Amino acid sequence: MTQSKPSIAIVEDDSDQLHSIEEFLLDSGYSVWGAGSAEAFYKGFTVQPVDVVLLDLGLPGEDGLSVASLLKSRPEVGVIILSARDSLDDRLAGMRAGADRYLVKPVNLLELAANIDATASRLAPRTAVDPAGSLVAATIPVAKTACWVLAMKDWVLSSPQGKCLPLTTHEFMFLQQLLRADGQPVPKRDLSTHLFGARAQNGAERLNLLLTRLRKKAAEAFSEPLPVKTLHQIGYAFTASAQLVQDTQRLH
């Protein structure tokens, strides 16, 4: 990504909410367009692709989870779900569908802008993919050099030596966020909110316990340490070469 503001598409069937977010983002210097349905978004994206999609779940016709699943094959496009659904099951469904972030409505607009910028900073360059922006499923290439691999569909972490470790829901969500940060630290607060929800208690302690157990499992499965670094009072970072793929079949 360059230092310029990312371009945004808002997919929201509530016209008042759409226009409110659109007006704020335009005033903040973003390039923005909106759509009231999945179908309208697909048409708009073909003509004017964007960097980040703000996606409501309760759309008429095709729902937001379906849109997120389709966008999962586009590593140059970030997805932020904006929804009033705040249960753990809903958040997990959104992340499994391919969302980078899940924010519960009503969303503070300054916080939304910060999430947009953070998401956009970690995207693949658009020049490396189809410039026409058509939403056609793309094959995510597997790096030729040995690295750690996280399979999105199967929830499996593989070591450079090809050994595999099945993950729990929270283990997968934790590692997914670290790998998407591309070696940069991910704050504990962001991880706690992502895994346990904004109102969760003792998030830092739960993260520490999660990582302790994950490290033990990884040491047994891989016979080598998990390359996750703890940065005191900051967060965590995945310090080795790594990539995300759709499923373990891409490893063969």
Image (cartoon, rainbow, N blue to C red):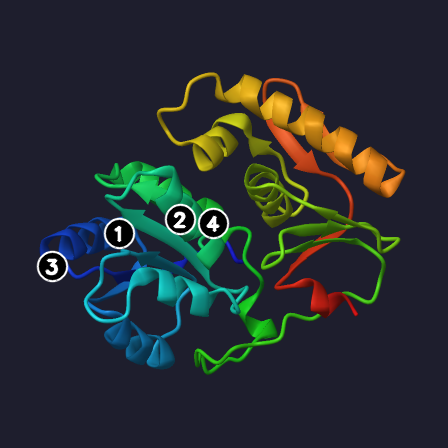
Q: Residue at point 63% right, 22% down?
A: 209
Question: Dots 1 and 2: beta carbons under 8 Å?
Answer: yes
- Label 3 to label 4, Cα distance in Å? 25 Å
Labelled pair 2, 4 in contact (Cβ < 8 Å): yes
Label whose residue precedes the other's in the sequence (3 or 4): 3
Q: Dot 2: within a 10 Å radius of its alpha carbon, few (fewer than 14), some, or many (20 or more) residues?
A: many
Q: Identify the residue at horizontal 47%, vertical 45% (top origin).
A: 118
Label 4 residue SS = helix
Residue behind mark 3? 15
Q: Amino acid at mark 1?
A: Leu
Circle 3 sits in a helix, a strand or a loop, which is it? Answer: helix
| SS of the residue under disc 1 | helix
Checking the image for residue 165, the label placed there is none
Q: Between 81 and 53, which is closer to the camera in this rendering?
A: 81
Q: Indicate which disc residue 25 carries.
A: 1
Could you tell which of marks 1 and 2 lies nearer the N-terminus?
Answer: 1
Q: Is residue 129 left or right of residue 211?
A: left
The percent coordinates of residue 120 (x first, y second) are: 47, 53
Residue 173: image quadrant is: top right
Dot 2 lies on which element?
helix
What amino acid does circle 2 point to?
Ile
Q: Earlier in the sequence, mark 1 or mark 4?
A: 1
Left or right: residue 157 compared with residue 104: right
Q: Nearer the viewer, mark 1 or mark 3?
A: 3
Q: Which of the two marks, 1 or 2, is nearer to us in this view?
A: 2
Foreground of the two, 171 or 234: 171
- How many residues crowd around disc 3 within 10 Å: few (fewer than 14), some, or many (20 or more)? few
Q: CA distance from mark 1 to mark 4?
A: 15 Å
Residue type highlighted by circle 4: Thr
Which residue is labeled 2 in the image? 116
